[in-house]
Image: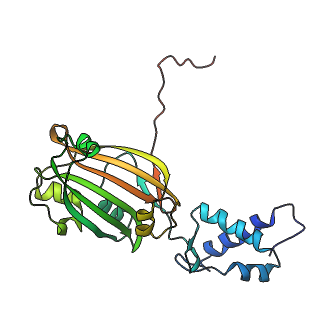
Amino acid sequence: MVKKDSPVPIYFQVEEIIKESIDSGKWKKGEAIPSERQFCEQYSISRMTVRQAITNLVNEGILERKRGKGTFVSAGKVLQDLTGITSFTEQMKELGKSPETKVQSFEEITASKQAAKELGLIQGEAMYKIKRTRLADGDPVAYETTYLPCRLFPDLAKIHAAGSIYDYIERQSGMPILYGRQEIEASEAGKKAAEALKIHEGAPVLKIQRTSYTEGDLAVEYTKTVYRGDRYKYVMELERKTSGSFQPFT
């Protein structure tokens, strides 16, 4: 129950009530929680207080708002280890989730300046451009735009894009991917990404650009991905680096 005479802010008490209901299994992942009005009536508190509590939990990734439907218990964030390179399909299977891919478009284009630079191509050279929405257990978590050189993969077809492109590159083309270089930045969802990920335009997202390489430092794939900020979390282990001049206290 909410204690109005407590020094603990009421909105924080509501947050704890919601968390306890989720932890106890009363409200399960993907299930709708009571409306703001119901909270107000049950605890005799203002809607502003309830809204602040819910907003805080949405920002933490514990709850999620669905336009026109209400507020739901979040399905949880997908964790990705930054210490290695894996495909989305491999990553989801390792986490015990069911991966799914929806191909939005598959076309052959001439390489732009940026894509040509990343893949070591001549500007204007033929390349594939593939747009895909990646889902985990039916929930959209990533929106990708992938570029591959046509001369390296002349038989690549839309059907291959519906699965793991890494698998196609490695198994069908016999070119093992050895390493990758990627950049990560916080951003806001544009219109197309928001529609694909079923979030509000301007919602917080992670933008990642990655170029993957095979033997001989040959760039084989360049991908720009938008990840839902409430669905993705990157983790990594760091080793302490010292200059070698450290002296213990005596």
Instruction: Point out residue 144 in the picture as x, y percentages from the top left corner.
Output: 34, 59
Q: Is residue 219 left or right of residue 186?
A: left
- The image quarter containing residue 36 is bottom right
**Vertical comparison of 85 with 61: above or below:** above
- The image quarter containing residue 215 is top left
- Identify the residue at image location x=18%, y=67%: 158
**Vertical comparison of 10 with 154: above or below:** below
Instruction: Point out residue 133 in the picture as x, y percentages from the top left corner.
Output: 35, 66
Q: Quadrant of the N terminus?
A: bottom right
> Which residue occupies the foreground of this view, 51 or 30?
51
- Identify the residue at image location x=17%, y=55%: 169
Q: Is residue 217 left or right of residue 68?
A: left
Instruction: Point out residue 204 in the picture as x, y percentages from the top left corner.
Output: 53, 57
**Vertical comparison of 97 with 226: above or below:** below
- Identify the residue at image location x=35%, y=71%: 98
- Identify the residue at image location x=48%, y=24%: 242
Q: Work out which residue is located at the far right of the displayed protein and give it.
A: 5
- Counting labels gives 0
Q: Is residue 163 visible?
A: no
Q: Quadrant of the C terminus?
A: top right
> Which residue occupies the foreground of this view, 227 or 167?
227
Q: Is residue 10 visible?
A: yes
Instruction: Point out residue 93 in the picture as x, y percentages from the top left corner.
Output: 33, 65
Identify the coloring. rainbow
Q: Is residue 107 left or right of residue 237?
A: left
